[in-house]
Image (tube, rainbow, N blue to C red):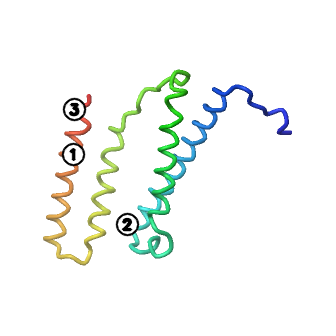
Amino acid sequence: MFQEFKINNKQAKLQLTYKLLHDLLFILLLFLAATLLAEGLLPGIVSSHVGISKLIIPIAGIIFLISLISPAIKSGIRDKKKPSGKKMIFFLSLFGIILVLNSLLKAGILLNLTITILVTITTYVVYVIMIKEEA
């Protein structure tokens, strides 16, 4: 069954490796996001079993491999238009505020609201500086 699946062209092998590394990077980033989400909602549930560094090191290695392979095949792959995240910014902001509030449950209500407002303002300023200036 797999005998007919032979890749003779070096460029095709590089493209296949490049795409597989991108898929693996996407899966690991999703797993990292789920891990951080679980850690934010229930502190200690993940870090007591698995260190976050065990996820960060393979992600860094895959990014390094992609950066090594990409100059060799960039001419064959067309860049797609970047998707706009403007629709998700409200939901991500709300989710971030909920996570900040959850992490400060034992603090006083005034301290909790002050820190949440400061984090929200800081996030907005960073968004304006980083994203808005590119457009």
Q: To which quarter of the image does residue 83 belong? A: top left
* SS assignment at label 2: helix
Would residue 76 be found to the left or right of residue 89 on screen?
right
Give x and y (percent) for residue 24: 57, 47
Q: Which residue occupies the foreground of this view, 39 or 116?
A: 39
Q: Residues within 10 Å of mark 3 (few under 14, many from 20)?
A: few
> Quick check: marks 3 and 2 in contact, CB under 8 Å?
no
On screen, residue 44 above or below 27: below
Give x and y (percent) for residue 37: 41, 62
Real-space CA distance between mark 1 and mark 3, rounded to the nearest whole angstrom: 11 Å
Give x and y (percent) for residue 101: 26, 66
The residue under label 3 is 133
**Depth-wise, is mark 3 or mark 2 nearer the camera?**
3
The residue under label 2 is 40
Q: Amino acid at mark 3?
A: Glu
Q: How many marks?
A: 3
The residue under label 1 is 126
